[in-house]
Structure formats: structure tokens, C-alpha cells
Image: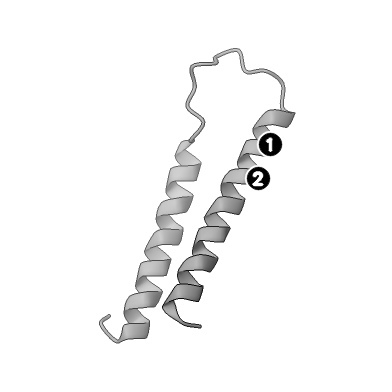
Amino acid sequence: MNFAQFSASIGSVITDLFLVMKSADSDSKPNPNPSDSGITLETIITVGVVGWLAIGMVLMGLGIW
């Protein structure tokens, strides 16, 4: 797997994650607090962890880390 394929797969995973979370939000009851952000803390943490793992794998693959 080269870098382009790897980055494309990470991008599709993140896109799928956002689509799943968005569809789950649309199925639920209306929120009494409509001012809440669409991006939750869990989403930020998940994207950060996946990004950190991706960077680590790329750096290990290049022999830098």
C-alpha cells in the first residue's frame, strides 16, 4: 500500500464516520438545545487518534520513527 492509497483510505474512513454520525443525528428526536455544535468531543478525539495513528504508520513506513 503506497502513501496515496493509505491517505485515501484514511479519508474515506473519516468521511464514513461523519456520515454515520450525521445519519444518527437525523434519526433522533429534535434536540431541545439547537445551538449545540454538530462536532462532538468524541468526534474530535476519534479523528485525533486516527490521525495520530496514520502519522505514526507513515513515519514508521518511511523509517523516520
SS at mark 2?
Answer: helix
Q: Residues within 10 Å of mark 2 (few under 14, many from 20)?
A: few
Q: Residue furthest front?
A: 4
Say which mark, if any, is on residue 20: 2
Residue at the bottom extreme? 63
Q: Residue at x 47, y 27 (%)?
A: 37
Q: Residue furthest left?
A: 64
Residue 63: numbered disc:
none
Residue in view at x 55 percent, y 14 percent: 33
Relative to 14, residue 36 above or below: above
Q: Which residue is mark 1?
A: 24
**Looking at the image, is 46 positioned above or below residue 38?**
below
* Element marked by disc 1: helix
Q: Residue visible at 53% across and 54% down? A: 14
**Marks 1 and 2 in Cβ contact (< 8 Å):** yes
Residue 52 found in image quarter = bottom left
- 4 versus 26 height, above or below: below
Between 49 and 38, the residue placed more toward the observer is: 38
Q: Is residue 4 above or below residue 10?
A: below
Where residue 21 sits in the image (x, y, percent)? Answer: 62, 41
On the image, the x and y values in percent for residue 10 come to 50, 64
What crowding class fits label 1: few (fewer than 14 Cα within 10 Å), some (14-19), or many (20 or more)?
few
Q: Identity of the amino acid at label 2?
A: Val
Identity, as a three-letter code, of the amino acid under mark 1: Ala
State the count of labels. 2
Q: Residue 15's x, y, as percent?
A: 56, 52
Q: Nearer the viewer, residue 65 or 62?
A: 62
Q: Is residue 35 left or right of residue 18?
A: left
